[in-house]
Image (cartoon, rainbow, N blue to C red):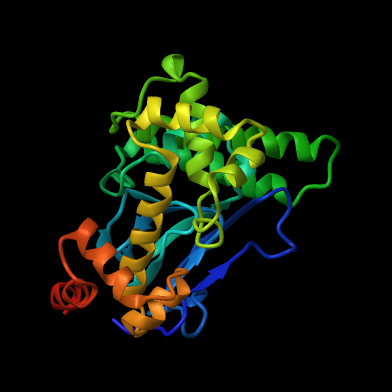
Amino acid sequence: MPYNQEIITYSQDKSVKNGIYLKELAPQSFEKGMVGHTHRDDYYVCILVLNGTFRINCELQSNELKTGDLLLIKPYQIHTIEHYSEDFYAYFLSIQDFRIPDELTYLLFNLSYTQQQISLPLEATQTLLETIHLLLKNESKKEEYATEITDGLFQALIYKIGSLFKETTQVPEISIINQSNVITSKFKRLITTQTHLKQPSYFANQLFITPAHLNDCVKKTTGQTVSYWLKKSIINEAKRLLYYTTKSVKEIAFELGYEDHTYFSRLFKKHVKQTPLQFRGDAMELAS
């Protein structure tokens, strides 16, 4: 797999209306250089494979998708298209976070990586396809209430996707999701490569609560503090940079906000039980 010096983050094109973008994916639709291009998106991506095979590396793991598979990529997860068959055909759906209801955001955002790919029964695939076709058909119409119809169809589609993932996960039932769960989920969604160096007060301000209340909610829900999750985010980002880029440990430490790269290496080893170079070496060996 080719490696980058920098990881680019993409946003939806300004022409995308209402935070939803749906398109067909096939070999002829891929832009030049897309295969092997490591990047991340600031929105959710769903890929429904209808024919052929598709291999994508996401968060240090390689996924092989086949007909009837549905893959969810969460915002800011690093991924690289590795390969696709000549008969590959799929639908690609990108969704801005604000378009997803809170209860579904809690479900989707809290999926573990191993839960982000599922194989669908034929009936479920057909239901998704029927809704997708209605969405695409309605997009070209300029009739009265077209926007409201599109929103309704999208809600049906995203709730169906949520129900399919719910069947395969251990995420708490919607009925027992409380305020602490919701606040914790929103806090985790706010942690990105641009914010994980911020103080807990920054996240509390974003959620219009006090730092103490934020910490209480996060501790109650996860058993760990806000500071723990911020440090975990930094360690996870270090793993990504070690795996997906050619940057030196010193460069990575500096990018993550550590002026002393030896301190960063000690911190990394404490959490990962390997030095940064040992982690990179093992990761490269597994990828080869």
- Is residue 101 placed above or below 98 in the rendered structure? above
- Residue 237 is situated, as x and y percent measured from the top left of the image, at 38, 64
Which one is in front, 25 or 5? 5
**Residue 263 location (% of width, % of height):** 31, 70
Position of 276 with respect to 246 (left or right) is left
Q: Residue at x 46, y 84 (%)?
A: 33
Q: In this image, 168 relative to 253: left or right?
A: left
Q: Which residue occupies 32% across, 31% down?
A: 223
- Residue 61 visible in the snapshot: no
Placement of 161 over or under 37, stated as above or below: above
Question: Whole-percent x and y of residue 243?
Answer: 29, 74
The residue lying toward the viewer, choosing from 86 and 108, is 108
- Which of the image's four quarters has the N terminus? bottom left
Q: Residue furthest top?
A: 175
Up-down: is 239 above or below 251? above
Answer left or right for 172 relative to 188: left
